[in-house]
Structure formats: structure tokens, C-alpha cells
Image (tube, rainbow, N blue to C red):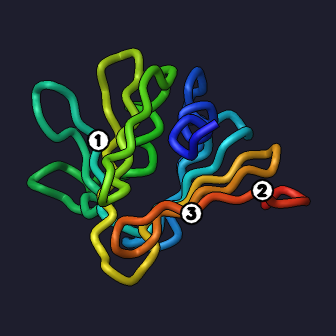
Amino acid sequence: MTKNEQIEIAFTGLRCTNVVIFSQASWRFVFEERTVLDVRCPWRIVTSGGVLLGHCDHQQQFGLLKPMDAKQIAQRLLEAIVVQVTIREGTTDLFLVFENGVALEIFNTSSGYEGWECSTNDGFLAIAMGGGGLATREIDPPTF
């Protein structure tokens, strides 16, 4: 099985059930307590109509009555089932498409720092390396 197929299996058919914000540049997306996606690079949630939410929108007011709660908005937007997983070759940008037409797009932007990592409760770990490489390994015990 290829690395991309392993990552596809890690997400397909699951819903994002929790979003955790560690800092403006560090987010965690939890998929039914089976798969965890830690993101330390830019991301956005989009539909065919445009950008619905971006990693830098949390606590921004944008003329609204109160600042945006990006955690709550992301959880609502990503509640459908993941139906497609794509990893862009050469950059390891990750795209998760949900059955409601929403997509979570993650952009690995550094030549040196790791952009994101995915781990599963059965011990699979994938790391988007700086510069666009992808590393995978089995971890025993699993990381969560």
C-alpha cells in the first residue's frame, strides 16, 4: 500500500468531531477519535463559492457583532463525512473533501519545517516534511 493510500484510509468515511486551537499557527482536527490531524501551516475551508474560513480568522471581528470563533465554525463546516483525500505531489499539500461539498485545504509552506502530521489510533503516522517530502511510519503504541 502506498503512503497516499494509507492517508486516504485514515480519513475517508470519517467526520471531524473536534477542533482544538493551540495557537494561531497550531491547530488539531480530530476525526471520530480515530485520526488526528495536527496542522502547523496555513489552511482554509472552502466551497465552490469561495473561502468560508481561514487559519488566521480566529478572533477577528470583520465588522461583525463579535469576534469569530473559528473553532466552532470549523467544527460546524467539517461535520460531514470525508469522501476524497488528495495529496499534492512535490508539496504535500493536503486536501480533504467532505460529502457536503466543503473542502479543508492545508498548505505545506516551509522548505524546512514540517507543515502537518496525521496519526491514527492503530499506529500509522504521516508527516509532511519541509520542502514537500512525505514520511510515514508505524508507531507502537499509537500517539493517542
Cα gap from disc 1 to disc 3, whole angstroms: 25 Å
**93 relative position to 116: left or right:** left
Could one spot residue 144 in this view of the protein? yes
Q: Is residue 144 above or below residue 99?
A: below
Q: Which residue in the rendered view is the most extreme toward the top?
A: 99
Q: Residue at x 44, y 50 (%)?
A: 71
Q: Secondary structure at mark 1?
A: strand
Q: Residues within 10 Å of mark 3 (few under 14, many from 20)?
A: few
* Front in this rendered view, residue 47 or 115: 115
Q: Residues within 10 Å of mark 2 (few under 14, many from 20)?
A: few
Q: Residues within 10 Å of mark 1 (few under 14, many from 20)?
A: many
**61 relative position to 142: left or right:** left
Mark count? 3
Cα gap from disc 3 to disc 2, whole angstroms: 11 Å
Return the x and y of residue 20 as percentages of the image width and height: 55, 57
Return the x and y of residue 29 as percentages of the image width and height: 54, 49
Residue corresponding to mark 1: 45
Could one spot residue 20 in this view of the protein? no
The amino acid pointed to by label 3 is Ala
Cα gap from disc 2 to disc 1, whole angstroms: 29 Å
* Front in this rendered view, residue 97 or 65: 97
Quarter holding the N terminus is top right
Return the x and y of residue 89 as percentages of the image width and height: 32, 50
Residue corresponding to mark 2: 138
* Front in this rendered view, residue 92 or 61: 92
Q: Secondary structure at mark 3?
A: strand
Q: Which mark is residue 135?
A: 3
The amino acid pointed to by label 2 is Glu
